[in-house]
Each structure stands twice: as structure tokens, then as C-alpha cells.
């Protein structure tokens, strides 16, 4: 009958089952089964934490539920609940608004991750994506300027900022705005790299290189001069290779990252007409 303890136990079990499924299970049907089980436990944990009126644990449960929904591609599930989850997190975060407690900004993490990731979803309209990018940037900056929470979350937020500025760069209505957003994007990517280097490996460092990849790929996409495009593609390739070296990838994630690197080599080879670049792309595709 101890709702608080049951909430903690169910949260831990749900988190580890979802994490195991996402990170280690290669069979998609088996992975889906474990994710269903983990998400069910997290939803039960949320019921217990609400019963116990544990505000910190409520935000934690909402974070894990939405996190695994975002990164496992459960878009329909996420869309049905995300706005209520965001409002609840922000409301709970306001309780700590006058303190230096990490919970002060914890409530902003879910909206930051959701809006920055949603800004790149093509099924949203251009105006929606721009709006989501602007909202995501606002929430991400509030978290990064607040009490330190964890290196992994900071790395996610830097990536989110780069994703958001990338979309604003691509969707900009004037050259002046595009150059401004592109400058902010590259600045955030370089800060992400600098932040990741403090941890000498793992996700924070991999995340820094992923941010650099996205920034330089975006700059290559908007470049008019051939030599500028080539320069940014080479920098994107270098960053992507470094990211793969440091990342802790699931089987699906490893395939995605290798395919991304192959596509970069292919694009570079088509522009330069250099056979070694095209051969490198071919090798990436064959061994993925």
C-alpha cells in the first residue's frame, strides 16, 4: 500500500526494461514486446507517484514515458498525451521557480526535447515546424542556463538546439535571417563539441559530434558555391565518423548512423566525381 515505494520500483523496472529493449534487442517484434511491457510499467508508476503526490517523481515518470515514446518512434501514442504532459511538467516546475533546485528546470526538458525534435518532422507544416523550433529553443536555453542536471541531458539539449536552428535556417524567408540562424546553429554545435570533450567519451562526446554533423550538413545543403558545399560535407563526414566511434548505439541506431555516413560519402562523391568517395559510400552500404 506504499504508493511512493511502488512508484519508485515501477519507475525503475519500466526504465530498465525500455532501455534494454531499445539498446540491446535486435528483433523488432521482440523489441516491441519489451517496450510495451516497459511503457505499461511506467504508466503504472505514474499512477502510484500521483497517488503519493511526489512531484519530483511525477516529472521523472513523465520524462521517461515521453522520452521512450520520442526515441522509439511512437508518434501516435506521444501526440495523444504530450500537450497534457508538457503542461503538467511546467506547472510542477513553477513550484521550484524561486529556488536553485534542479527541479526548477526539469519541467522544461520534456517540452525542449519534444519541440526541437518535432521541428524536423516533415508531416508538420512549415509554419508549425518554425513555431516548434522557436519554442524548443526557448525551453532548451532555460534548462541549460539553470542548475546542472546531467551530462547526457545537456548533450540532448545541445542537439535539440542544433536541430531547431537547422530548421529555422532551412525555412528562413530571407538571406539575412538564414545567415543569422546558421551562425547560431554552428555556435551551438561548437559549444556541444566543447561540452562533450569534458567527458572523454560516451554519449556527451558523441552528441557533440552529432551536433557538428547536423550543423555542417545543413550548411552544405544551403551552400551555393560548390567548394563551400564540399568543405562542409567533409566536415560533416569527419564529425559523423567521430560520433560513431564514441556513441553507445543500439543495433537499429548503428545501422542508421552507418547509412548516414554512406549517404554523406555518396553526396560528396557525386559532387567531386571522385571514385574513392563513391567507393567508400558503397562499402558503407554493403557492410551496414
Image (cartoon, rainbow, N blue to C red):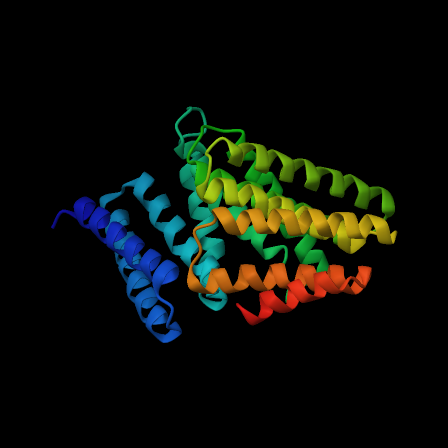
Q: Image quarter for residue 176?
A: top right
Q: Residue at x 61, y 59 (%)?
A: 261
On the image, the x and y values in percent for residue 154 come to 49, 38
Relative to residue 10, is residue 183 drawn left or right? right
Coordinates of residue 170 in the picture (x, y in percent): 75, 53
Residue 172, position as x, y percentages in the image? 79, 50
Q: Is residue 12 visible?
A: yes
Locate residue 154 relative to residue 128 in the image: left or right: left
Please tell me which residue is depicted at 72% across the width and 57% down the height of the picture: 127
Question: Residue at (75%, 62%) from the top-left corner?
Answer: 269
Judge by depth and name the residue closer to the eye, 222 or 69.
222
Name above or below for residue 31 compared with residue 2.
Answer: below
Identify whether 288 is placed above or below 141: below
Farthest residue toward the bottom? 29
- Tell me what residue is drawn at x 40 percent, y 39 percent: 92
Q: How many marks?
A: 0
| Residue 33 horizontal side relative to residue 79, left or right | left
Q: Residue furthest front?
A: 276
Q: Where is residue 182? Give x, y as percent.
A: 75, 43
Q: Residue furthest top?
A: 99
- When asked about the image quadrant of residue 185, the answer is top right
Is residue 107 something one can see in this rendering? no
Viewer-proximal residue among 267 and 132: 267
Amino acid at each position: 500500500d506504499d504508493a511512493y515505494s511502488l512508484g519508485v520500483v515501477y519507475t525503475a523496472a519500466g526504465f530498465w526494461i525500455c532501455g534494454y529493449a531499445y539498446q540491446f534487442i535486435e528483433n523488432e517484434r521482440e523489441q516491441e514486446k519489451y517496450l510495451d511491457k516497459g511503457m505499461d510499467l511506467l504508466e503504472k508508476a505514474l499512477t502510484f507517484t500521483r497517488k503519493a503526490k511526489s512531484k519530483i517523481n511525477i516529472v521523472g515518470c513523465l520524462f521517461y514515458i515521453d522520452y521512450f515514446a520520442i526515441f522509439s518512434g511512437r508518434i501516435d501514442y506521444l501526440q495523444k498525451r504530450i500537450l497534457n504532459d508538457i503542461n503538467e511538467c511546467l506547472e510542477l516546475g513553477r513550484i521550484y521557480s524561486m529556488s536553485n533546485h534542479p527541479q526548477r528546470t526539469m519541467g522544461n526538458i520534456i517540452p525542449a526535447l519534444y519541440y526541437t525534435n518535432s521541428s524536423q518532422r516533415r508531416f508538420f507544416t512549415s509554419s508549425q515546424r518554425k513555431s516548434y523550433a522557436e519554442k524548443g529553443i526557448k525551453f532548451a536555453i532555460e534548462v541549460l542556463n539553470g542548475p546542472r542536471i546531467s551530462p547526457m541531458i545537456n548533450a540532448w539539449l545541445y542537439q535539440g538546439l542544433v536541430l531547431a536552428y537547422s530548421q529555422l535556417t532551412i525555412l528562413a524567408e530571407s538571406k539575412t535571417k538564414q545567415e543569422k540562424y546558421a551562425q547560431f546553429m554552428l555556435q551551438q554545435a561548437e559549444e556541444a563539441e566543447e561540452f562533450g570533450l569534458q567527458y572523454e567519451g560516451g554519449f556527451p562526446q558523441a552528441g557533440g559530434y552529432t551536433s557538428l554533423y547536423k550543423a555542417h550538413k545543413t550548411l552544405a545543403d544551403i551552400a551555393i558555391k560548390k567548394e563551400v558545399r564540399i568543405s562542409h560535407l567533409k566536415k560533416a563526414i569527419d564529425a559523423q565518423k567521430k560520433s560513431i566511434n564514441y556513441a553507445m548505439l543500439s543495433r537499429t541506431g548503428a545501422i542508421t548512423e552507418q547509412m548516414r555516413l554512406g549517404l554523406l560519402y555518396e553526396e560528396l562523391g557525386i559532387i567531386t566525381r571522385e571514385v574513392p568517395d563513391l567507393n567508400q559510400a558503397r562499402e558503407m552500404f554493403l557492410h551496414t
